[in-house]
């Protein structure tokens, strides 16, 4: 994990106990967590936190590059630690999210820069389909986003 205290200080922000708690919960979440679940977990440890504090700090963390924000086809925003760049496979049946890495996106960014003169600042690949379990079961009518784990390259 990046040193959040240093990053916050350089940005003119204080490294408070609440921010430390939220970052710890995000980094321990082992996946993608939304604001509502982060709020529920944080309230168990500190009753002084409000939902608006959660949203304000998530925005700050995102702006400072401490977390990544994703939207997997629904209106909910999910957050995860800023780690090695990866992309997501989202199952349309069960809603599970699988992570994968793809070296081709780095090459594509470079090619776009050379061929089109376009300065790419970020890439996000989200591929939708059906996981092996849902293919076997013939799909599913319910859809709930759930983190499944890291995939291969």
Image (cartoon, rainbow, N blue to C red):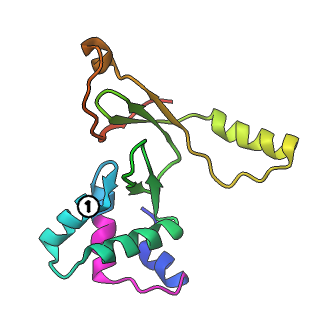
Q: Nearer the viewer, residue 134 or 99?
A: 134
Query: Residue 49 location, x and y as percent?
Result: 23, 78
Query: Residue 39 location, x and y as percent?
Result: 23, 66
Q: Residues within 10 Å of mark 1 (few under 14, many from 20)?
A: some
Q: Residue at x 30, y 19 (%)?
A: 139
Q: Residue at x 33, y 84 (%)?
A: 16
| Residue 151 lies in quadrant | top left
Highlighted range, magenta: 11-24
Total number of numbered discs in the rendering: 1
Q: Is residue 109 above or below residue 132?
A: below
Q: Is residue 69 above or below residue 137?
A: below
Task: Say whether residue 20 is left or right of residue 72.
Answer: left
Q: Quadrant of the N terminus?
A: bottom left
| Residue 92 lies in quadrant | top left
Look at mark 1 in the image and give the residue it sits on.
Answer: 36
Query: Residue 19 location, x and y as percent?
Result: 33, 76
Q: Residue at x 45, y 70 (%)?
A: 59
Task: Say whether residue 134 is left or right of residue 89.
Answer: left
Is 15 inside the magenta-drawn segment?
A: yes
Q: Secondary structure at mark 1?
A: helix
Q: Residue at x 27, y 54 (%)?
A: 29
Q: Nearer the viewer, residue 36 or 102?
A: 36
Query: Residue 83 location, x and y as percent?
Result: 47, 53
Is 68 inside the magenta-drawn segment?
A: no
């Amino acid at each position: 994990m990046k040193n959040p205290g240093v990053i916050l200080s350089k940005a003119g922000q204080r490294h408070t106990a609440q921010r430390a708690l939220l970052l710890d919960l995000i980094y321990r979440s082992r996946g993608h967590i939304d604001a509502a679940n982060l709020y529920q977990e944080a309230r168990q440890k500190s009753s002084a936190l409000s939902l608006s504090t959660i949203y304000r700090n998530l925005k700050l963390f995102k702006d400072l590059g401490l977390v990544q924000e994703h939207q997997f086809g629904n209106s909910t925003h999910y957050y995860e630690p800023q780690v090695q760049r990866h992309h997501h496979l989202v199952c349309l049946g069960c809603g599970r999210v699988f992570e994968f890495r793809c070296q081709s996106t780095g090459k594509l960014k470079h090619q776009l820069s050379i061929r089109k003169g376009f300065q790419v600042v970020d890439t996000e690949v989200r591929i939708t389909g059906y996981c092996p379990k849902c293919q076997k079961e013939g799909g599913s009518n319910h859809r709930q986003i759930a983190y499944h784990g890291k995939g291969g390259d």
